[in-house]
Image: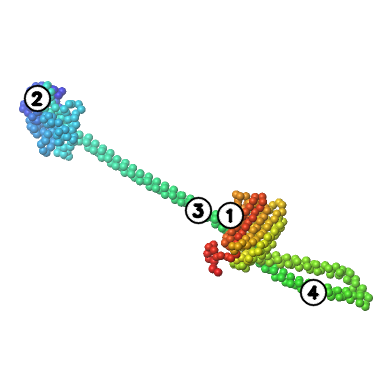
Amino acid sequence: MPHSTASAASTSGPGAHAAGEAGPAAIALSAFLDGHPVATFVLDTAHTITHWNKACEHLLGWSTEEMVGTKNHWQAFYPKQRALLADLIVSGVDPAASEHYRERHKRSALIPGAYEDEDFFPNIGVSGHWLHFTAAPLRDGGGQVVGAIQTLRDVTERRVAENALRKAHDSLEHLVEKRTAQLAEANQRLEDDIRQRELADAELRRRNIELTELNAQLGMAQQQLLQSEKLASIGQLAAGVAHEINNPIGYIFSNFGTLQSYLGSLFEMLQAYREAEPHVADAATAERLRAMREGLDLDFLREDIPSLMNESKEGIVRVRHIVQDLKDFSRVDANQEWVWANLHQGIDSTLNIVSNEVKYKADVVKHYGDIPDIECLPLQLNQVIMNLVVNAAHAIAGERGTITVATGADDGGHVWLEVRDNGSGIAPDNLSRIFDPFFTTKPVGKGTGLGLSMAYGIVRKHNGAITVQSTVGAGTTFRVLLPVRHDKSPTEPGAPQP
Ligand SMILES: Nc1ncnc2c1ncn2[C@@H]1O[C@H](COP(=O)(O)OP(=O)(O)O)[C@@H](O)[C@H]1O
Ligand SMILES: [Mg+2]
């Protein structure tokens, strides 16, 4: 095909076109080109247009008559003269060396020496057109270039579609990017939210634990308060009862003394009558007196009445003691006052109070040392002694045991008090917990677990110390150390200075 067109090109010229083709092949070429729907023009080696087909006329708006035989083909495309691809082929210039085509041209894959190019031409048509060029050399039989043929296809629609597609693609990509960013942001927000929720959750759980602990502490404090409240009211009640009994017992006791001395006088008088009896002159009267004396068994009465009186007096003395102990123990009047008091007195009255709890289980042995009075809260110390002694009694089961209460003083201004038992002892595991509030090994109803914690608190208030030594199966010793003088301590910040 290139060969036949080459020979056609060599014989055709401007004149030939105007005058008609010489041979059937040339005619065939011109007709062929006109019948061909692709816009096509042909240049000879002098860059003169030899063919400009109908499709070209139609596409570019320049007629065949205007173009053939001229070198004005550039006018159809550009405002200024410049080489087209076909011109470069005819000149033997590689488009790669041309400033206009360097960047855009492509070598044809099918035809050697042919090139392709695509460009936009704003001057063609109303709003410009995209054209795709193909330019190929025309060669003679010897392979010599004798011209060039260039075709142009209108690819505007494709380019527009491509552009629209690219735009759509771009906007889609943009949209995807935007959406991705939005999603990432939302995701970030969600993660932040989750993290914050987790933090809040942890905080809540921590608070809850704190509150639960606080609640437990509050419960304990309340129990302790209740317990001490109960003890205080029991003490008050006891003190009230003791006070009421104290008066009548007082006058019974003093009347009793008087009664005893009156009775003594009466018995003396009776003795005098008895001795005067033989001297009664009237026999009937003397007989009546004798019968009455024997009937009443006056001799027995004279022996029995004083012993009855003594026994009763002993009883009254005991009642008086109990009442006094109750009063001493309660000391409601001196409830919270620091006073100088003797420990032995407190121990004695307390032992009397708890004797009922102790006397069936153990003998109480006292080893009192020589101790000075101490500045203390006596009622509260009595409470300590009571708790220790009752615990000691509880620890003794089965065989009768011994509870030893000992006191003494050291050189460092302290007195000490020991309550020792030969009871069950305390298991080593429990030893560290016995002072905890509510720690008890006793069955419900028997133990509250508050005795030792209260004792500990009271001893601490006195700036003293309480220690324990115990051997399982052998017994336990509690030792309380108390300062003689009460030092206003940091545990009582509000206490007035002496
Ligand atoms: N002398 C003691 N011998 C043996 N165990 C004792 C003695 N004193 C206290 N304990 C132990 O310490 C626990 C706590 O005592 P306490 O605080 O007085 O409470 P409670 O007597 O109500 O149980 C007792 O349950 C007991 O196990
Ligand atoms: Mg107890």
User: Which structural element holds mark 2?
Assistant: helix
User: Given contact means CB atoms under 8 Å apart, are the residues at marks 1 and 3 in contact?
Assistant: no
Q: Residues within 10 Å of mark 2 (few under 14, many from 20)?
A: some
Which label sits on residue 10? 2
Which of the two marks, 2 or 1, is nearer to us in this view? Answer: 1
**Residue farthest to the front, as pictured:** 411
User: Which structural element holds mark 4?
Assistant: helix
Residue 268 percent across, percent down from the top left = 83, 74
Q: In which quarter of the image is the N terminus?
A: top left
Specify the quadrant of the image occupied by residue 15: top left
- x 10%, y 26%: residue: 146
Label 3 beta carbon within 8 A of ligand 1: no
Q: Quadrant of the C terminus?
A: bottom right
Q: Which of marks 2 and 4 is nearer the N terminus?
A: 2
Q: Which of marks 1 and 4 is nearer the N terminus?
A: 4
Residue 317 percent across, percent down from the top left = 73, 67
Q: Which of marks 2 and 1 is nearer the N terminus?
A: 2
User: Given contact means CB atoms under 8 Å apart, are the residues at marks 3 and 4 in contact?
Assistant: no
Which label sits on residue 262? 4
Which of the two marks, 3 or 2, is nearer to us in this view? Answer: 3
User: Which structural element holds mark 3?
Assistant: helix
Which label sits on residue 412? none
- Is residue 260 shown above or below 12? below
Residue 451 percent across, percent down from the top left = 62, 57
Label 4 beta carbon within 8 A of ligand 2: no
Mark 2–mark 4 distance (CA, rounded to whole Å): 184 Å
Mark 2–mark 1 distance (CA, rounded to whole Å): 125 Å
Kind of residue sitting beneath label 4: Tyr
Please give the residue where the numbered disc 3 appears in the rendered image: 210
Q: Earlier in the sequence, mark 1 or mark 3?
A: 3
